[in-house]
Image (cartoon, rainbow, N blue to C red):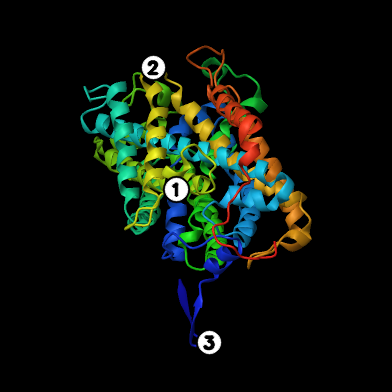
Amino acid sequence: MKVFNTESGALEMDSGEKRLNELGYKQELRREMTLFKTLAITFSSMAVFTGTPLYGSCLRYAGPASLIWGWVVVTFFTWFVGIAMAEICSSFPTTGSLYFWAAHLAGPRWGPFASWCCAWLEAVGLIAGIGAQAFSGSQALQFIILLATGNNKGGGYFASKGVFLGMYVGLTIIWAVLNTFALQVVAFLSIISIWWQILGGLVVIIMLPLVARPTQPASYVFTHFETAPESTGISSKPYAVILSVLLSNYCLYGYDTAAHLTEETKGADRTGPIAILSSIGIISFFGWAYNLALTFSIQDPNYLYDPNNETGGGLVPAQIIYDAFHRRYQSATGAVVFMCIIWGSFFFCGLSVTASAARVVYALSRDNGIPFSPIWRKIHPKYKVPRNAVWLCAVIGMLLGLPILKLDVIFTAIISISTIGWVGGYAVPIFARLVMAEKNFKPGPFYLGRARRPVCLVAFLWICYTCSAFLLPTVYPITWDTFNYAPVALGLVLSLVMLWWVLDARKWFKGPVRNIDVNNGI
């Protein structure tokens, strides 16, 4: 792709494409994304209302103070991770992003193994992320229908597990179909998404406390700490705090989406880092404001979890919104409208996560890193998108939802797998950047210099903590109905991946495979 240089009056190669060629890759995907479009898709992958399904359980563990201030603490450490990734993205603007970074930063000896681990962690996390958004979107739709047709007390329709699974599969198929077309379709919808979430977020954040007046006092929101061992089985205060902060840990990641789109973005060595950091800033502000709006608007904390309330105690934010509107207007219409805004956030988020997952699978298959790679790396001749990779991710995402029919804790497992895989994938290139010799790193426009070592160290330790937290049991006593299946599922998948590496893959997998011969000096 050529861009016009206003100073010289000549056409020049796009800086992102030039760096891509230096790294040994030719431009195959269509490079037409602007900074705003990249930011829109990245922002959509994080989403303002992502934490809605977790809000109730995290509030119950340790009360509002832990939830609210936990967001601030997580935001602080998230900036370290984002800054570390922005620097690497500026140097390596490739679709393979994390796993490509890991290969080059770890050096020729450890590069293949580092990229292998990173690629599979990222692929597992992103595909599980599709399932997490499909579940969240289906749950929001379930309660929209319940409140629109009455409520739990008034004969409203509550979707059965079979219907719920149908919603889950339907959303996943819609996302896959939309991602089958040119990325510009997803980019256009993501532009709608960013305005949907900003404007819709402002409506919910501002209007909900106004409708709910009188609201909870600031002392309750910012200082009230209370565990609930009778319902959670957790009496340890530190343990309760760790679990209450899971909401923030879950919401504040996904900004690597900008890196996955760098081969389709103009000036990606600059726009990629900007999109990463801008997304963190926007989501940090709006997410915290949303949690504050919900917490201030609580009418009766104990009634939120009552299985006989209007939402059956199934989705606490839906009950908070219903209580506010019903108390003031004796109607659920406003609550239905607000829930539709929240549902739209999940829809757009799932669409963007599907795009990211497909590009990770495409990049890995381009380097022969998964079975039947020639199939998954095919690019649609007209739309220039990895269509087969899109549908592979969608099918696996749908299979993840099948246990919905039998297990009540499937959402806990899906979000744990998604977070550990997705965020765990961040750790590999960041650790490699931490320990590598500085002379071997070719910086891009965004460069940390001497600050890179402390920044990367804090980022790496924070990622380790986050992944560990999502492996913990969330309810006691542990039974088949309350067991967190994420450690078992992840352990099985990663064990198979490592076994494959030891027995076979280490003999032929060399990490990213160049498809042009360029002497780039790295």
Find out whether the residues at labels 2 and 1 contact each other: C-beta distance under 8 Å: no
Q: Report the amino acid beneath label 3.
A: Glu
Q: Residue at label 1?
A: 377
Tell me the residue that label 3 is attached to. Answer: 7
Q: Residue at x 53, y 87 (%)?
A: 7
Write down the residue under mark 2: 406
Relative to 429, is 57 above or below? above
Residue at the spot 59% in from the left edge and 49% down from the top edge: 98
Characterize the local packing of mark 2: few (<14), some (14-19) or many (20 or more) Cα atoms within 10 angstroms.
few
**Quick check: 393 above or below 88?**
above
Give SS at disc 1.
loop
Dot label at residue 79:
none
Discs 2/1, front: 1
Numbered disc in front, either 3 or 2: 3
Asked which quadrant contains residue 167, the reply is top left
**Residue 168 position in % (x across, y down):** 33, 32
Q: Position of residue 516 (x, y in %)?
A: 55, 61
Q: Nearer the viewer, mark 1 or mark 3?
A: 1
Name the foreground residue: 329 vs 426.
Answer: 426
Labels 1 & 3 near each other (Cβ < 8 A): no
